[in-house]
Image: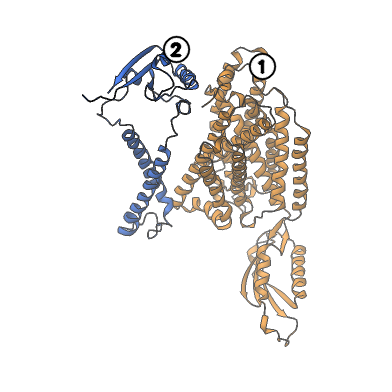
Amino acid sequence: MKEIMEEKVIYAMYEDDDVLLNGAKALVAEGVHISDVYSPMPIHGIDPVIGVEPTRLGIAAFLYGLTGTMLAAIGLRYFMITDWPMNIGGKPSFSLLENIPSFIPIFFEFTVLCAAHGMAITYLLRNKTLPGMPPRNPDPRTTDDKFVIEINESENSKHSLKEITAMLKKTGVVEMEEKVIK
Amino acid sequence: MNYQISNKAKKVTLGLSAIGLVMVVLGFFHQKDYVYADYVNEHALTIRYNGDASDEMQNDLKIEMNSILNSKGYKVDFHDANHDESHNEGHASHGFEWEAHIESNHEGEHVNHGHHEDISASIVEMIDSGEISFFDTHYRRFWSNLLVNGFFFFGIALGALFYLALHYATESGWGVVLLRIMEGIMSAMPVGIVVLLIVFIAGSLGFHHIYPWMDSDVMDPNSSHFDKLIYGKKAYLNQPFFYLRVVAYFATFFLFMKWFKKKSRQEDNEGGTESHFKMYRRGALFLVFFAVFSSTMAWDFLMSIDTHWFSTLYGWYVFSGIWLSGMVMVMMITLYLRKGGYLPFVKESHIHDVGKWMFALSFLWSYLWFSQFMLIWYSNIPEEVQYYFSRINDYKFIFFGTFVINFVFPMVFLMSRDTKRSAGYLIVIGLIIFIGHWLDVFNLVMPGTLFDQWNFGLLEIGMFLMFLGIFVYTVLKAIGKSPLLQKNHPFLEESKHHEF
C-alpha cells in the first residue's frame, strides 16, 4: 500500500480584523509561519506580517493601459485619418498629430477600459475565482464577517501543532478547526 | 507643543523679501513700451506705434536711433507715413508710423562689401527685443505683476481655508493634526487682500488699464473708444457692483477665517463637542458661499481682463489651481516644521495623504485645463478662440510649459507610494508645481494686460520672492501664536492613529 501524503492544517477564526492582525503578529514573532489569511475585505498592513510579496497587478495594469492607448491610436488613425478623413469643424483631418486634442478623450477612455478589464480578469484568473469556479476558502463565512488564519503543519517544523494551538488560543480566536488535507 | 519662528527662518524669509524688493525697484525702471518695426529692405524700415507718446518722447526716440546708427557709420531720415492727418478728427492721438531711410555716411567708400551687414535688419531686431523702446509710463508690468502675485498668494490662503472648511464639513478625521498648519496658512490672507484691493482701486483711479471695462470711454456710446461687446456686459461689469462683490468676497472669506480660528481656540480651552459641531455646520455653510464666490471671483479678478472672452469652466479651472497651491503650501510648511521636530504626531501616513492630494489635484487641474482648451479649440468660434490665439502666439513656451510642469511632473514623480512618503521628492516636486502654478496665474493675467510686450526679468522674479518671503513669514508667525495640536478635537485620537 502506497503511503499518501497527508498534511494537517489549522484554521483559526476571528471576528475582528484588528484582533487577527495582532494575533498574526504575535505568532510570527514566535516563529510560526502563516500560510494564508482569508478575509472578506483587505486588512491594512497584513501583507508584510505574513510575508506576502507586493502584488505585481499594478505593473500588469500599466501594460494593459499602454495596450489600450496604442490600440486607440492605431484605431483612430485608421478610422479618422486613413480610411475616411472627416472634416469636423474645419479641423485638420489628414494628420493624427495635428488633430490629437480631439482624440484624447477617446485615448483616455480606451486606456481606462483596457486597464480596468485587464486588471479584473487577471485578478480573477490568478486567484482562480472566475464565476462558477469552486470556492477555495475554508469556510463560507470568510466572505461574510469572519476572518481566518491558515497554518500548515509541514511549514512549521519548529513547533508542534499542539504548541501552535496553544499560542492561537491566547490571541482571541473564536473558533478553531484542524483538518487533514490529502 | 508650541512653535516659535526661529531667528534663522525670520532672516531667510525677510531677507528673501528684501532681495525681492531690491529686484523690484531695479526692475521698475526697466519697464518698456515697445514700438514695432517692419523690415522693408536693407535701407528702409517702417516703425509703428499706436500708444500714447508725446512729441518730445518721439523726438528722443529719433535721436536715440540716430546716435546708434551714427556710431555704426550710418544716418537715418524719418518720414511720417501718415500723411493724411484728417483721420484724427481733432482727437489728439500720439501714435505714429514712420518710414525710416538709412544711408551710409561714407558714400563711395563701399570697399568693405565682404562683410556687409544688413543695418536695417539689425535695427528691426533691436526694436523687437525692446532695446529701442519707450519707457512705459503706465507701469503696466508692475501693476500686472502685483495682480499676479496678489492673486496667487491670496489663492493659497483661500485654498487652505477651503480645505479646512471641507475637513470640518465632511467630518474627516485623518487630518486633524494638520489643521493648525492650515489655520496658519489661511491667516496670511490679508497679504493678498490688501494687494488686490490696491490693484483694483488703482484701476478705478486710472493708474492702469488692466480692466478695460473700468474705462468710462469704453462704455460711452458716443466715444471713439466705445466697445459694443463690453457695453453689453454692463449689467455685471460696472464699478459699483464690482466693488460690492469684492467687498462681499473679502468680507466673507476674512470673517470665516477669523471665526474658524476663534472657535478652534475656544475648543482648546473649553473642550467638549459644541465648538466642533458649530464648526461642522459653519464649514458646510462656507462651502456654499465658496461654491458661488470662487467662480464669480475668478471671473471678476481674472477673466474680466480679457473682457470680450468668456468661458464657463474658468471658475473651476482657477479654483483647482488655488486648491492645489494651497495643498502644496500645507505640505511644505508641514515638512519644514516636522524636520524641526515640532510635529511628532504627524506620521508618514499624513504626509502620504497630503501627497495624494497634490497628485490628485494636479490631475483635476490638468483635466480642466484640457477640457477648456479642447472645447474652444474644437468649436473654433472667433470670440472664444482669440484667448488661446494670443497665448499660443506670444506665450507659447510658458503656455504649454505650465501644462507639462503641472501635469507630467506630478504624474510621473508622485505616482508611486514611496515618493509620496519621501520628504526630498515631495519638496522638489512641490516646488516645481508651486512655481508651475505661479506661471499659470502669470499666464492668466499677462496676455490680457501686456499682450505681446511681456518680459520676464528682475521685476517678475523679484516680486515673486518678495511676496513669498512676506507670505511665509506671516504664516510661520501665525502658526507660532497657538499650540500646534488641537488637543480637544473629537477626532484627534483617530488622526493620531492614522496609518495605512
Location of residue B166 with respect to B246 vertically, above or below = above
Q: In this view, does B482 lie to the left or right of A179?
A: right
| Same-chain status of marks 1 and 2 | no
Which is more toward the observer, B96 or A144? A144
Per the image, the residue denoted by label 1 is: B268
Image quadrant in which you'd find residue B14: top right
Which-is-in-front pick, marks 1 and 2? 2
SS class, disc 2: loop
Q: In the rendered image, which quarter contains the N terminus of chain B?
A: top right
Q: What residue type is labelled 1?
A: Asp
**Residue under the point 46% across and 11% down:** A170
Most extreme residue toward the front is A1
- The blue-tinted chain is A
Per the image, the residue denoted by label 2 is: A172
Relative image position of residue B384 (x, y in whole percent):
49, 50
Q: In this view, does A112 lie to the left or right of B39?
A: left
Which is more toward the observer, B82 or B396? B396
Relative image position of residue B404 (x, y in whole percent):
53, 49
**Residue under the point 50% across and 21% down:** A29
Which is more toward the observer, B430 or B117? B430
Q: What colour do you see for chain B? A: orange
Relative image position of residue B303 (x, y in whole percent):
57, 44
Q: Which amino acid does label 2 sit on?
A: Gly
